[in-house]
Amino acid sequence: MTRLTVDPIDLAIFQSAVHSIAEEMGAALRRTALSPNIKERRDYSCAVFDGRGRVIAMGDHMPVHLGSMPMSVLAAIDAIKLGRGDIAVLNDPYAGGTHLPDITMVMPVFHDAEQEPLFYVANRAHHADVGGTYPGSMGPAREIFQEGIRIPPVRIVRGGQVDREMLDLILFNVRTPQEREGDLDAQIGACRVGQDRLLELAAKYEPMKLCALVDELLDYSERLVRAELRKMPAGEFCAEDWLDEDGVTDNPCRIAVKLTIDPAEAAITADFDGSATQVNGSINAVRAITLSACFYILRCLIAEDAPATAGILRPLTLVTRPGTIVDAHPPAPVAGGNVETSQRIVDVLMRALALAVPDRVPAASAGTMSNLTIGGIDPRSVRPFTYYETTAGGMGARNGIDGISGVQTHMTNSLNTPIEALEYAYPFRVRRYGYREGSGGNGAYRGGDGLVREIELLADAQVTLLADRRKFRPYGLAGGDDGVAGKATLLRNNLSNSLASEELPGKCSRQAKAGDVLRLETPGGGGWGKA
Amino acid sequence: MRVAIDSGGTFTDCVYLADGELRVVKVFSTPADPSRGVLDGLSQIVAREKYTGALDVRHGTTVGTNAMLERKGARVAFVTTKGLEDTIAIGRQTRQRLYDWFAPLPECLVPRELRFGVPERVSAEGAMLREPTEEELQALLESVRASGAEAVAISLLFSFTQPITEQRVEASLHNLGVPVSVSHRILPEFREYERAATTVVNAYLAPRMQSYLERLEREVTAKHPESRVDVMQSSGGILPARVAAEQPVRTVLSGPAGGVIGAITLARWAGFERIIGFDMGGTSTDVFLADAAQGGARLTRESIVAGMPISVPMLDIHTVGSGGGSIARFDAGGMLRVGPESAGADPGPICFGKGDKPTVTDANYILGRMDADSFLGGSVTLHDERARVMMQEHKGPLTSVEEFAAGILRVVETNMEKAIRVISVERGLDPREFALVAFGGGGPLHACALARALGIGTVLVPALPGALSAVGILLADAVRDYSRTVMLASDDADGLQGIFTELEKHARHELRAEYGESVREERVSLLRTLDVRYRGQGYELNVAFDPSLPAKALDNFHDLHAKSYGFSHRERPVEIVNVRLRIAVAAEPYAPKLASESPNDGSDACTGERSVWFDGVALSSSVYARDRLRAEARFHGPALITEYTSATLLPPGSGAHVDTFGNLIVTVGEMQA
């Protein structure tokens, strides 16, 4: 038994208090943002860091953001000396970001007259457009310069005042500047909400006590993970899986991992050597994403109510080779790394883990976020619009329970856009939204079914799809069948008013006309155990 | 005469006002038909008071709550726009637990074969794009009829902007002869899933609640002519029974809401502004938190009950499925578990003579915490021999019945402690800064143990702890909420006055129709508010609207936005989304009588000594009759303070004080055996 250096009740209250601050920042962001992707789908995350940039609390938001945000804070601290009332903004995947649509803000929190920040708060939100070749900034680009505006860590707020010049520089580079400005305002506000609540909290504690609580919280997370690792079998567990293609060539892209579990040292190593060299298309992941996937896996191994802090990563050694699909270098395009490759990295890690603890690991879930972006001019307002949404698929079956149908899994947990919000904001009509019957893999326990969604366009628009699991299906485990592959069809409204259909590749962009219908069918989860 | 009746767990509590004081009658609940208990209580009251006039009956019911928790509602047919039938099951396509690979399968209230699509469409702007033909409506009627549905929920896309098709579908399905709930009346707000789910819950409860409330009202007025029946809503206000029968979704937390209002009122009289309420009944326990400085009890429009979102306003109450009747057993792995199965009122605990499974009440009995002479005024025989023998049979590997009993209490108290952490610690609030207000049959028995576990220093056992929910219902205001979605740009704000005038006219008309001309104007209050946001946002802030200072509302909006969300822009366009009017009729004022007594040691209320177990040791403890304790009494534990349906356990090291209202205030100390 480890002895706590602080009172366990104090620790529990402090943990809940900082966690609820992260949640409150999220609520402020959701309630003030303008774009449906943030206000309805909650495609954002908020976190609280100590003065050294170590994460001590994260809201229950998007796992892919949460594991990678610490790098943003460290990048901001490295790049600029943030003073009182300053807020830094960044999105460059090669300087603390993950992909360009995810814009992160970082704010230092100063206590009284202290010279150094006591805490940092940060939030990250997915913007429906950040410029570049394709509306929605999620298209099949070949280098990062085509993916939108790159923002290294810079101040967007100086001493409490928004830097209008910096803001205009960003807004001049995007398709929907008014919506972006509203969303950026919401992010700035959320930082301030976090700051105010942290200062209230800090006032309740002696400074020394506060430091002790922070250290203890980090140690506590670490202990939980190490206790779990001690119970695991020792050994090396190797697994691989593939992304269908990169959207430029037809070649499958391999992701491979060797997990080394050392229960004696309560340590784990994830070595991704053997993964593909970085590719021409936009599915490259920066190292922060790979780390994020590892964080997610370790977090899932411990109790649901355990705190998600930087301590979780202490038992992990991550090995990646620079210039690979799991550790991309500039100017590789990366839009899909965050949303597609991140899910595949999780699939590979789980497949390896299933070799060590087979009963504890579910079969593969949908494994693609089925990212859809649509941009054009809304005939109702005669103004540009950009729409972004991911659609859930089937969850992999578990030992003892079927997989859940039509649910977000692993690295994402964004909501759907209510149809009533969608049609109010965009020139679309949703014709169908339901389960894709029979798409879950068979087995002793069935994989969850995917979803079917049909959107009719009421205006000419550029439709961009970034999806996977068309060729390599979500794997079953312990003898269960694979889930059914995903599919997308564009039904063209031709002159005779009958629909000609085109099955779309997983990663593509098409100019579509008013009256065309896009049908998206998402993959089912894998089955578990022999039927 | 005003009477409040709360038919919660084992007992149906009746509280009424006579000669300026609160009086209590308790009768056994009749779960198969709770109205029998209500009528029984009313008969006893009129007999006792020799009263023949009309009764103003206010009812707190758990019929809806139990149907939700036990999943025993109606077979609901869900009717929506064709192509979207599964949306009621898909929900918002998120998982509840982010990092749990073994989360259970969610269970939709509407199974697949009961989901129906109507070929129809309304645009976002409210334009009718496609209407169902009469043949299509007929076909729908036939398939719903064939499904054997017991209730129908209709929720079509954009019905809050254009309700005509919902009305046509309703008219057609009316022919089924089952209750039909329609989304544009239950919750005329956007976001189709939340609106549909709230409508489905309403339909799920409708058959049971309608027949229950209609029968109750009929029987009450048959026996007591000219009487009326109202029902407590989940939001803490009173609603006419007829309206509650149509909108049972508003009564899901009817009984518990009474407890919240009662606890807050009595605690405030006693000078406690920050409280954690702990209401332990027979089958479940409710906990809540109220801070007078933060506006009292929290209301929420984002409740989730039994896995379904409910978007009508409700008090923020957290419920766990354990109470005095919870059954204890050893599970397959040999672990002692308590609840969620309950022995309920029938057969009840072993010691009441009928039950044969050990319950929390039996454990309290074995440990000497129930006093046969005082329990229910001695009217219920406690079966000592039976309890000891059967507890012995069930005690598993434990060495003694006392050890088994103490184990049961430790498990159940841990469940309670966890529930309180959810509403305090998990929201970043320190329970040590609050007083624990304990009520319900079991609250006062377990309060000190719980307070000690949480570090809470003060326990308040209000006067009438076994009937506090009924007291809250008796003292609650009658409240109706009206709203209209207006979507006005801020410079159209001039029209607001007209809209409020119209709403007010309608509200007053309904008020008169319901309560007649007898309502005195000085007791009626109107609260006018606006839901405002910056154009393009998805959520609103609610600000007060003063007809004499209309511009003030928008000023307040900008200020509140800055305070809540860290920024505001006075030049940015504003949108007024909803206009809300709350009309409340204040309950007849009641001022509690204050006792003037001199300090005393309570010895004149001491009825004897009994042996009570604390931490494995039997200690001789004084027994006090609560109704004989005078104000300003001060004494120490170990002691048991008995009353009609409850008892307060005062452990060694703790001290009790009776205040001038008759509340028992316990200063919780460290255990010293």
Image: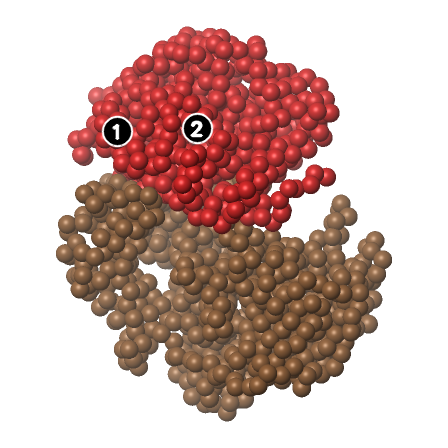
Chain colours: A red, B brown
Chain label for disc 1: A
Q: Mark 1 falls on what kind of element?
A: helix
Q: Taking B203 as reference, is A296 left or right?
A: right
- Which quadrant would the C terminus of chain A be assigned to in this image? top right
Question: Counting residues from the N terminus, which is met first, the one under dot 1 or under dot 2?
Answer: 2
Task: Identify residue for label 1.
Answer: A167
Tags 1 and 2 both on a single chain? yes
Q: Nearer the viewer, residue B586 or A240?
A: B586
Residue B179 lies in quadrant: bottom left
Which residue, as the protein is rendered here, is positioned at the far right? B399
Q: Nearer the viewer, residue A522 or A75?
A: A75
- Residue B265 visible in image: yes
Image position of A227 with respect to B428: above or below? above
Q: Taking B135 as reference, is B633 left or right?
A: right
Amino acid carrying label 2: it is: Val
- Residue A466 visible in image: no
Q: Residue at x 85, y 57 (%)?
A: B399
Q: Residue at x 52, y 46 (%)?
A: A206
Q: Residue at x 82, y 72 (%)?
A: B385
Residue B321 lies in quadrant: bottom right
Image position of A268 with respect to A277: above or below? below
Q: Nearer the viewer, residue A227 or A357?
A: A227
Tag shown at residue B159: none
Q: CA distance from mark 1 to mark 2?
A: 20 Å
Q: Nearer the viewer, residue A394 or B595?
A: B595
Q: Taking A431 as reference, is B410 left or right?
A: right
The location of residue A79, given as percent across then percent down, is 39, 22
The location of residue B320, given as percent across then percent down, is 58, 56
Amino acid carrying label 1: it is: Leu
Chain label for disc 2: A
Task: Identify residue for label 2.
Answer: A73
